[in-house]
Structures are given as structure tokens and as C-alpha cells.
Amino acid sequence: MPNPVKTRVINTLAELKEILSTVKKEGLSLGFVPTMGALHDGHLALIERCKNENSICLASIFVNPSQFNSSEDFKRYPRNLEKDTQLLEKAGCELIFTPIEADIYSGPAIKNFEFGEMDKVMEGKYRPGHFKGVADIVSRFVKIIEPDKLYLGQKDFQQVAILREVLKQMDSNTRIVECPTIREENGLAMSSRNELLNSKDRNNAGIIYRTLCEIKEGIASIPIETLIKKGMQKINSVNGFQCEYLLLVNANTLEAVTNNSDVDTIQACTAVKVGKVRLIDNLRIK
Ligand code: AMP
């Protein structure tokens, strides 16, 4: 059945504020899905969930320069606003916000967020400044939009943990809804960056999820150190693949876990470089 929702594309902060004031006046529940575009089924699952749980679904498309720690990566990041708009229209997303940099960054930062060790490990270690950029842009969006719910993908596990902290430090009433990772047929976590892989590497990249699943199977009987060593070896055995890190962390604090019996919730997290493309993935293993 055709979707009856008329999608509105908003380019300026002024227009967004005007529309939001109507949404709030009418007491409509508002869900927000921040994205950097190049949309795939992972993003669309967030949109679907947001639509199911709110009267209005607002998605943003903004390739945020401050969260890239390499200008080459920023330039190379796939962009396709026309196709994204069509996908969001088809999905029945009511509002699309596509700001320009000067508009969204016109005022001062919302807060100088502090994350302790949380933004120093894993992605924070290999992409210095990345989470400061994420926190800055998402806090600006949340301050303006004040959504009831913020939809985030578990695929970016550390980002979810950081953004929980951001909302806490902002004293925000917005609630995070964490959505499961959507995968390609071979298990590779869907990502806009997958488009940058050649077909051989994209096929081979299924090894990342398989490795995480093997760690989950082994966690009860094999020492963590061995699981990590074997897992890294397995990923690195694929031609052109280089595992940057493979860590088992406390799912709440992101502290590295060395002994299975020490904590109740463990997440296996990894980042793998395939040529110039960097892939991340994670899996709850306990
Ligand atoms: P991005 O456009 O990469 O910034 O992602 C926007 C949102 O979509 C983030 O909350 C991501 O975690 C989420 N997301 C990206 N890929 C997936 C996926 N494969 N499954 C579920 N959520 C995803």
C-alpha cells in the first residue's frame, strides 16, 4: 500500500524551529534518528522503529566534519541526498533535517563533556577527537529538537555509551532507544562505508562477524587472552585485512575484561582496516 505520509525536507534551523513548535503545541510525540546519510537497511530499521513508537519521526542527514579525524575520510564519505530523501519518503519519515554546517554550528558548544576513560579506549584511541565531535553535534541536535526518544544503532556500541553520558550531563529528558545491528547476508554489519569496499573484500568481511560469534561460543571455556589472540589471527589471515583492536569489555563501563568471571555483561568489540576502509563491529557475548 502506498505510504500516505508527506515528507517535508527542512534545510534551515529557523524552519526546523518553526515546525517543531507546532509539533510541541499539538502534543505530538517526537522521535529523532540522527544519520550521516548514504542510507541502508540499518538506518531504515531505526526509522521504522521510530515511526512505530512516535507520532512524528524526524531524521537528520548531516556528514559531520568534526567527528572525522582524517580529512581524506571525510571527503571520501559517500553522499547521496537525493536517493536518501527518496528512501526516507518511502519509509514514511515525516521530517528530514539537512542542515548546512554554518547554521548548525552557529552557536557555542552546549557543554564541555567529559567521558573519563570511555572516549580514550577503542574508537577513541584510534580516532582521537571523534567522540568529542559526535557529542558536540548530537548535543546541539538534542538541545534544538528535544525529542522524546533518540534512536541509535548498537552497531556503534561505544557511541551509544558516550551519548548516554551526553544526555545525562545535559540533564536531558530524551530517552535513548538502542536498536539491534542489521547485517548483510554474510554477517557483515551494514555500514555506509561498505559501499567503498570491492566485492571480494565485502564478501570476505563476513569473517569479522564469524569471529565475534566464535568468541561468544568460546567464552565459557576458553581464556579471554586466547580468544582475542586467535580472533585477531583469524581476521588478519584474510588478504588485505588488518585488525586494529579486538577487545572484550564490560558492556557498561567499556573497561577491558581479562577474566570472564569478573563481570556479568561482556561485549566483544573490533575495528578492522580493509585497505583504506575501516569497519567496526561488536557483539554481546555475555
Ligand atoms: P551513521 O549514518 O553511520 O552515523 O549512522 C546513523 C545511525 O544508524 C547510528 O545510530 C548508527 O549506529 C545506526 N546504524 C548504522 N548502521 C547500522 C546497522 N547496520 N544496524 C543498525 N543501526 C545502524
Image (cartoon, helix red, strand yellow):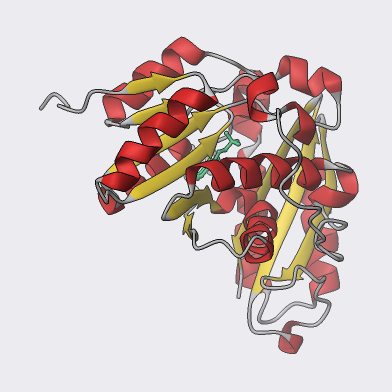
> Is residue 276 positioned above or below 280 on the image?
above
Q: Residue at x 79, y 23 (%)?
A: 73
Q: Residue at x 36, y 30 (%)?
A: 95
Residue 81 located left or right of residue 19? right
Q: Quadrant of the C terminus?
A: bottom right
Residue lying farthest to the left in this orientation: 1
Residue 248 located left or right of residue 93? right
On the image, the x and y values in percent for residue 109 come to 75, 42
On the image, the x and y values in percent for residue 94 come to 31, 31
Classify the position of ligand 1 by quadrant: top left, top right, bottom left or bottom right. Answer: top right
Report whether residue 197 is seen.
no
Q: Which residue is drawn at 89% across and 43% down?
A: 128
> Is residue 258 positioned above or below 195 on the image?
below
Report whether residue 222 is seen.
yes
Residue 189 located left or right of residue 94? right
Q: Which residue is drawn at 33% across and 22% down?
A: 8
Location of residue 22 (image quadrant)? top left
Residue lying farthest to the bottom in this orientation: 261
> Is residue 90 positioned above or below 187 on the image?
above
Camera-nearest residue between 75 and 100: 100
Residue 142 located left or right of residue 198? left
Residue lying farthest to the top in this orientation: 82
Q: In which quarter of the image is the N terminus?
A: top left
Location of residue 240 (image quadrant)? top right
Q: How many labels does the image show?
A: 0
On the image, the x and y values in percent for residue 275 come to 81, 25
On the image, the x and y values in percent for residue 51 come to 29, 44
